[in-house]
Image (cartoon, coloured by chain):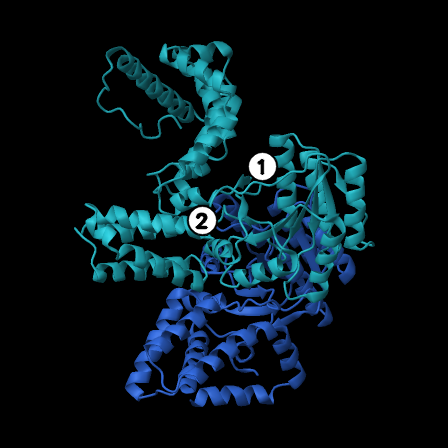
Chain colours: A cyan, B blue
Amino acid sequence: MAFESLSEKFQRILKKVRGQSRLTEANMDDMLKEVRIALLEADVNFKVVKEFVEQVKQKAIGAEVYTKLNPSQMVVKIVHDELTELLGSGDSELTYEKNKPTIIMLVGLQGTGKTTSAGKLANLMKRKLAKKVLLAAADVYRPAAIDQLEQIGKQIDVPVFTMGTGVSPVEIAKKAKEKAYNDHFDVLIIDTAGRLQIDEPLMKELNNISDNVNPNEILLLVDAMSGQDAINVAKAFNESLQLTGIIMSKLDGDARGGSALSIKHLTGVPIKFAGTGEKLTDLDVFHPDRMADRILGMGDLVTLVEKVQEEIDEKEARKDAEAMMSGKFTLDDLLKQMKRIQKMGSLGGLLKLIPGMPKITEEQKEAGEKEMKNFEAIINSMTPYERENPEVLKNSRKVRIAKGCGKTNADINRLLKRYESMLEMMKKMQQYKKTGRMPPGMGFPPGGMM
Amino acid sequence: MGLFKFLKEKIAKKNVKETETYVSGMTKSRENFANKLDELSRRYKEVNQEYFEQLEEILIEADVGVSLTLRIIEEVIEESKSEGIKEPTAINELVVDKMFIGYATKGGDITNEISFVNGGPTVLLVAGVNGVGKTTSIAKLAYRYINKGKKVMLCAADTFRAGAVEQLSIWAKRLNCPIVVGKPESDPASVAFEGARRAKEEGIDLLIVDTAGRLQNKTNLMNELAKISRVISKEIPNAPHEAFLVIDATTGQNGVLQAKQFLDCIKLTGIVITKMDGTSKGGIILAIRDELGIPVRFIGLGEKMEDLEEFDLDKYLYGLCLAK
């Protein structure tokens, strides 16, 4: 995921300072040099890096640092504050019209993810905000771009307005707007063709569309992998179109995305959304302050909490928790729990959000997800009676189940072992509830609830 | 600075028109980079610490990569000290020299054109992250080899992205060349296998296999790519003979990671760098060559079928640094 290496670097740098009792110019310089390299390697624009390093230096070498008892904490705070400043401040929500359609235009270079993001945005608005959304296919240049949007529209059950490739994009946008007004849509999202910011005729075409439909939002797609030039692209698009926001795409890759962040700093255009996967639900609202935490390796607890709240019916969860605490924990409960976790997205994505857990490798994550799938297959092959009373599972039953789900006896044993350790843990928790004392060996169980 | 002059002379002898299209495609990159170097050398009579810092920034801004940049600058500082070179233009030439020599001496010899095998189809596998221009590059490559009299077949093994198969099919129609497609969401490896089978059957010279965009940190998808490659070799031994990684010129430092991960997964034989007609300098290709030895084979300079050129280091550096 993005910023990982940057956060690791900061952690290492800060460790260096942590061992020393106070900040001197010499050890600050050393640290700032590493901060600079880390940021440059993250594709943060070199001008922004320069400013950033200078700001941190100015603040750190002030008297305030020396009066603090713990200088390293102060440095963490300064770096964090400055980083938050760099990323932008405050949440950046979209603004919606009340009595007419809200019109959103997506623009950007080729291959940044406009069409996919159009689908994701439509899906988000429909699902979360219950908006009536219309997509419009105004990319008449790239072969099959319209096909792509139509297929996406079908997947998320959102209508797509098309006029084929024989009509000018301006005309398509105008007609789409008419349709959005006539049929009382809440939102119209216009997908445009990718173009270079130096392609004057095509940039003019965007101006033309914008003048004709008067969009509420013009969002620029920025690829998280983009390098130093991203800032020139954003500047050019902003100068000709007055952008209202940025969507960062491909943040599920391992690019650190620093360049997109410099855009906010140098153009003032806020980053509003982050694309975090290939599924049409993989679009998150962008939170600069939380992203700064993430860069510093502090995890992103708030996002995690929101994600969990959204997906879990709280009442149901409480009922489960009570059942668990009373010791009536069956394989069905285990399955329910696992399903809920799956619904929240991949285990890997979730673990990333938890502070203090940056050391899990891709392989380990995948192994975990695979195990969950195996468990589900096994439990689904059991009779209800077996699920309620796992102790009846002797060899003959296991052989039958193994055949049913195509797994091995060893797989079933692994599941039962996991179940037992969960049961054990729950018993300890009950004890804790009664005595109020934490039994030894509790805390985060390895591989535990996940 | 013999090499530098040699470079200029070598370029001057080349087919003028060819060099012109190459350079005009790169106008924006060139202006930026060359102007900056030029401007910098005018501002200083003698180089100093500050001068080198600015040089460093110019290279970093071209996405040459932090570690490679730092190394180039360090070497130049040392050489300038030991040889007493203080004149800015001479220092600039030294920088370009370093880039040239570094690229030319890393990895094996470079032949840009696809090397065809005797007796049977040559298979080219094309991979890359999402949105870099794989499908468009494939169309351009197909066009290139059809014009050279080869029988080309396309294989649409991107069964994942909506509209991907349609996109390649439209190109196949325009190019008037056969295409193998599978059912939507079918196993891409099975489509590739079918492609290999049919290419053999129909006496095709070049089979180009398109694959879905995949981010290099997604193990499942990378395994899928390895499988595609494996399955092709089952039908045609030693295939794919060529495997190109497509990289977007706007890519920053992540480009090196991309190349590394794809190299771990399939036997890459070259890079196609796309979108070089924009303002990005694509300097990351120097870092990729430096760290992994993978050469750039072709360069995409526009959206039309013919907008594909062989990569030529002389011309690239000439366009990037020297042209006025």
Q: Are marks 1 and 2 on the same chain?
A: yes
Q: Quadrant of residue A438?
A: top left
Helix, strand or loop status at disc 2: loop
Q: Residue at x 82, y 54 (%)?
A: A167
Q: Quadrant of the C terminus of chain B?
A: bottom right
Q: Is residue A45 above or below residue A275?
A: below
Q: Is residue A363 above or below residue A218?
A: above
Residue A281's mark?
1
- Identify the amino acid type marked 2: Ala
| Closest to the observer, B40 or B310 | B40
A72 horizontally vs A276: left or right: left
For disc 1, the neighbor class at 10 Å (few under 14, some 14 to 19, many from 20) is some
A332 horizontally vs A237: left or right: left
Helix, strand or loop status at disc 1: loop
Q: Residue at x 22, y 59 (%)?
A: A27
Question: Is residue A199 at all visible to an observer of this figure?
Answer: yes
Residue A236's mark?
none
Query: Given the image, what chain letter belongs to the residue carrying mark 1?
Result: A
- Mark 2 sits on what residue? A2
Return the residue found at the far right: A166
A225 horizontally vs A417: left or right: right
| Closest to the observer, A265 or B109 | A265
Q: Earlier in the sequence, mark 1 or mark 2?
A: 2
Whole-number angstrom distance, CA of label 1 to CA of label 2: 19 Å
A422 horizontally vs A349: left or right: left
Report if the CB atoms under discs 1 and 2 are less than 8 Å apart: no
Return the residue found at the far left: A21
Give the image location of residue A121, x and y in percent.
62, 40
- Identify the amino acid type marked 1: Thr
Give the image location of residue B321, x and y in percent.
51, 79
Give the image location of residue B260, x and y in percent.
45, 58
| Closest to the observer, A432 or B190 | A432
